[in-house]
């Protein structure tokens, strides 16, 4: 890692259903930082759910809202940020997050992700005829972007508490450098 980096925040990235928000909340509590979720920030700014934004304005508009949130976050400190699953597909978003955060990617196999999201209906991109195939395809396409994170943590065989513990340890170590 570049020594010139100033790590003021912790950002969790990774595919839908890997546990970014749950792990992020636990890590924030342990580190005494404030938790924010980019989807929730967008929803409260627009007064609309992510699903409604996709339906009424389309994915491109949603990605633009994500970029605006990322720009806002760059000026803040003391945050644990859960990033929407597609946000780091824009390299400029990842670069911005890395300029002020330790970026940790939570990883899970497609089967694990499916088990975690199958009973949820709020994610427009998974409303597909064959959601399992969609997860496999999207995860493969996104893997190179997720692997640009500073730290990669597998969540398949770990409880959310264990994953949060790893995240916290990495952050404590890196933010002291
Ligand atoms: C998306 C992930 C979602 C949300 C939107 C698009 C994606 O966030 O931003 O539905 O492209 O992977 P979560 O990863 O928090 O579910």
Image (cartoon, rainbow, N blue to C red):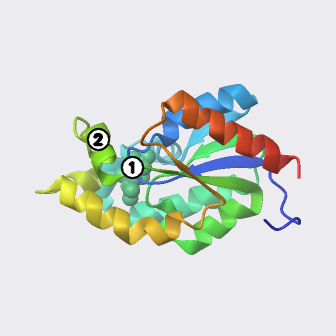
Q: Is residue 139 left or right of residue 115?
A: right
In the visual, does 3 lie left or right of 120?
A: right
Q: Residues within 10 Å of mark 2 (few under 14, many from 20)?
A: some
* Ligand 1 has an atom within 8 Å of the beta carbon of the residue at disc 2: yes
Mark number displayed over residue 40:
none
Residue lying at the far front in this picture: please name it. Answer: 157
Q: Earlier in the sequence, mark 2 or mark 1?
A: 1
Residue 168's place in the image compared with 50, above or below, is above
Q: Which residue is mark 2?
A: 117
| Residue 154: image location, x then y, percent | 50, 48
Question: Residue 38 placed where, x, y %?
Answer: 53, 48
* Nearest to the observer: residue 123 or residue 105: 105
Residue 127 is situated, as x and y percent measured from the top left of the image, at 19, 52
| Element class at badge 2 | helix
Q: Quadrant of the N terminus?
A: bottom right
Tags 2 and 1 touching, CB below 8 Å: yes
Identify the residue at image location x=23%, y=40%. Answer: 118
Left or right of 12, for residue 137: left
Q: Residues within 10 Å of mark 1 (few under 14, many from 20)?
A: many
Above or below for 153 versus 145 = above
In the image, what residue occupies the spot 55% across and 64% down? Answer: 67
The answer to whether residue 55 is visible is no
Q: CA distance from mark 2 to mark 1?
A: 8 Å
According to the picture, the residue beneath numbered tag 1 turns out to be: 16
Numbered disc 1: secondary structure: loop
Q: Residue at x 61, y 61 (%)?
A: 149
Q: In the rendering, at what x and y percent does residue 10 appear?
A: 69, 47
**Residue at far left of view:** 129
The image shows a total of numbered marks equal to 2
Residue 22 visible to an observer of this rendering = yes
Mark 1 vs ligand 1: CB below 8 Å: yes
């Amino acid at each position: 890692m570049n020594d010139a980096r100033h790590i003021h925040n912790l950002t969790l990235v990774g595919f839908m259903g890997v546990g970014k928000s749950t792990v992020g909340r636990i890590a924030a509590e342990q580190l005494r930082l404030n938790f924010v979720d980019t989807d929730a920030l967008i929803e409260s700014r627009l007064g609309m759910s992510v699903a409604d934004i996709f339906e009424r304005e389309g994915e491109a508009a949603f990605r633009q809202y994500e970029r605006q949130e990322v720009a806002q976050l760059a000026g803040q400190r003391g945050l644990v940020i859960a990033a929407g699953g597609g946000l780091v597909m824009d390299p400029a978003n990842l670069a911005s997050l890395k300029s002020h955060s330790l970026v940790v990617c939570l990883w899970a196999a497609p089967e694990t992700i499916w088990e975690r999201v199958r009973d949820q209906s709020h994610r427009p991109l998974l409303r597909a005829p064959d959601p399992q195939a969609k997860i496999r395809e999207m995860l493969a396409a996104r893997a190179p972007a997720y692997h640009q994170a500073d730290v990669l943590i597998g969540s398949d065989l770990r409880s959310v508490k264990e994953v949060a513990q790893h995240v916290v340890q990495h952050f404590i170590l890196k933010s002291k450098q």
